């Protein structure tokens, strides 16, 4: 039940620039890039302003960072929104906007704070009498200045330079063509390793309306994914409500496809999408990089006429959720370990009534007991085998096609 992906590539060696820099008018302070905005706005407006740069409101994780805010504010006295939000009156209930956890390892709250009855947002005081102290504040009815935070990067003339990488947007292409194009420029389809990086990529399309971009993730098994560039799978942002049908992955930057902006969902690898390439910033790419061969990623497998399928797994009609073809005949041989039965759950079922049908047998051959022939729209239903094998067939005629079926099968302890 595992579609495998083989990558044959060339390993390119780069020498990265040693000096970290900041972009977009941000200032380097304690290995962070910070930018002060003196205008006073609500917490939400401050967050949105930072998001336009792919940044967060400032996060302060130690005493050095806390003192470093004074480097940015200088002699001016401000109260500044921070990227910290409290759900309760304990620092363990205060979470950083960059998804790095709570404030239990370091905080500088004034005595008696946090105090969520006052407000759940947090501000930093740069006023002389309370310099460096944090306070709770109402989020919506109070305005303050704020500081945005970006990670450092390396000097490069690319247009989108973030956290040591350059990002390049390209026009629509299928997965294989997109990956080959990225590799020709010493990069790969983008891999995403943090909420901040995901936020940055989404910020590049804030003014673009709605749509999606192809990213460099592929499905390696039913619920497992990997990055095509070989980097660690350390973060994901899949929309759990979206139908996961393909073996490649796209990120939405709008809502036209019913997927929220910044969320991921699977797509067919052969379909064309705009895509983002990612390469190290501040590096020299060879003028003629070695050719790279990319093995095609298989389309979402239906397992029609496959070999023995061991539980757990999923079977579908060919092309599901797109329409199956005319004159299709499929068999699915399902099995589990000897001590178990098979629970077969049809989660979606639409065929031409009385003409295109599914037959399910309680065993491994056509002489086994026939549970029934199913067609039309019977709705979700389940069947349980009496042994550890089950045979499923699907047949369509020469006219009219529909979306077909999707069914999961798993090991089950039968109670008679």
Image (cartoon, rainbow, N blue to C red):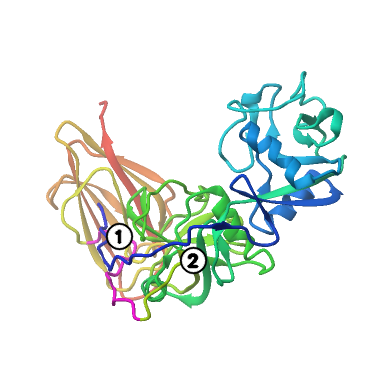
- Residue depicted at 39% across the width and 68% down the height: 269
Marks 1/2: CA distance? Answer: 44 Å
Please provide percent x and percent y for residue 97. 64, 42
Please provide percent x and percent y for residue 392. 24, 53
Q: Is residue 258 visible?
A: no
Please provide percent x and percent y for residue 181. 40, 76
| Callout 2: SS | loop
Q: Is residue 311 above or below residue 245?
A: above
Residue 200 in magenta?
A: no
Q: Nearer the viewer, residue 165 or 29?
A: 29
Give the residue pinned by disc 1: 302
| Callout 1: SS | loop
Residue sitting at the far top? 112
Apparent side of residue 34 relative to residue 394 in the rendered image (left or right): right
Write down the quadrant of residue 338 in the picture.
top left
Apparent side of residue 44 relative to residue 167 in the rendered image (left or right): right
Q: How many marks?
A: 2
Mark nearer the viewer, 1 or 2: 2
Q: Is residue 368 above or below residue 166?
A: above
Q: Is residue 123 visible?
A: yes
Q: Is residue 228 above or below residue 179?
A: above
Range covered by the magenta-colored residues: 288-304
Looking at the rendered image, the quarter that the C terminus falls into is top left
Mark 2 nearby-residue class (10 Å; few <14, some 14–19, many ≥20): many
Apparent side of residue 182 relative to residue 194 in the rendered image (left or right): left
Give the residue pinned by disc 2: 282
Secondary structure mostly seen in magenta is loop
Write down the quadrant of residue 78 in the picture.
top right
């Amino acid at each position: 039940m595992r579609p495998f992906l083989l990558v044959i590539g060339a390993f390119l060696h780069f020498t990265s620039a040693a000096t970290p820099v900041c972009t977009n008018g941000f200032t380097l302070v304690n290995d962070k890039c910070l930018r002060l905005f003196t205008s006073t706005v609500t917490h939400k407006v401050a967050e949105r302003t930072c998001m336009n740069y792919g940044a967060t409101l400032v996060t302060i994780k130690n005493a050095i960072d806390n003192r470093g805010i004074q480097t940015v504010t200088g002699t001016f006295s401000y109260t500044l929104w921070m990227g910290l939000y409290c759900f309760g009156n304990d620092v363990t209930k205060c979470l950083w906007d960059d998804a790095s956890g709570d404030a239990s390892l370091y905080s500088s709250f004034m005595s008696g704070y946090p105090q969520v009855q006052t407000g759940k947002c947090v501000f930093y005081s740069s006023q002389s009498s309370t310099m460096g102290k944090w306070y709770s504040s109402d989020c919506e009815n109070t305005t303050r200045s704020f500081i945005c935070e970006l990670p450092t990067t390396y000097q490069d003339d690319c247009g989108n330079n973030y956290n040591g990488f350059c990002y390049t947007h390209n026009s629509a292409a299928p997965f294989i063509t997109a990956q080959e194009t990225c590799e020709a420029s010493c990069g790969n389809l983008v891999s995403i390793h943090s909420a901040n990086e995901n936020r940055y990529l989404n910020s590049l399309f804030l003014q673009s309306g709605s749509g999606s971009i192809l990213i460099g993730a592929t499905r390696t098994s039913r619920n497992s994914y990997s990055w095509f560039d070989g980097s660690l799978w350390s973060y994901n942002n899949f929309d759990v409500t979206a139908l996961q049908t393909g073996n490649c992955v796209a990120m939405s930057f709008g809502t036209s496809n019913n997927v929220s902006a910044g969320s991921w969902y699977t797509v067919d690898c052969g379909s064309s999408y705009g895509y983002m390439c990612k390469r190290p910033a501040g590096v020299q790419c060879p003028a003629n990089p070695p050719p790279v061969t990319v093995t095609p990623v298989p389309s979402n497998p239906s397992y029609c006429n496959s070999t023995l399928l061991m539980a757990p797994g999923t079977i579908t009609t060919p092309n599901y959720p797109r329409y199956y073809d005319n004159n299709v005949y499929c068999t699915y041989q399902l099995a589990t370990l000897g001590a178990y039965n098979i629970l077969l759950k049809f989660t979606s079922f639409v065929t031409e009534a009385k003409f295109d049908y599914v037959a399910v047998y309680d065993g491994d051959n056509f002489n086994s007991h026939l549970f029934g022939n199913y067609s039309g729209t019977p709705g979700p239903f389940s069947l349980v085998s009496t042994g550890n094998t089950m045979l499923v067939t699907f047949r369509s005629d020469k006219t009219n096609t529909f979306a077909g079926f999707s069914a999961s099968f798993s090991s089950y302890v039968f109670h008679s």
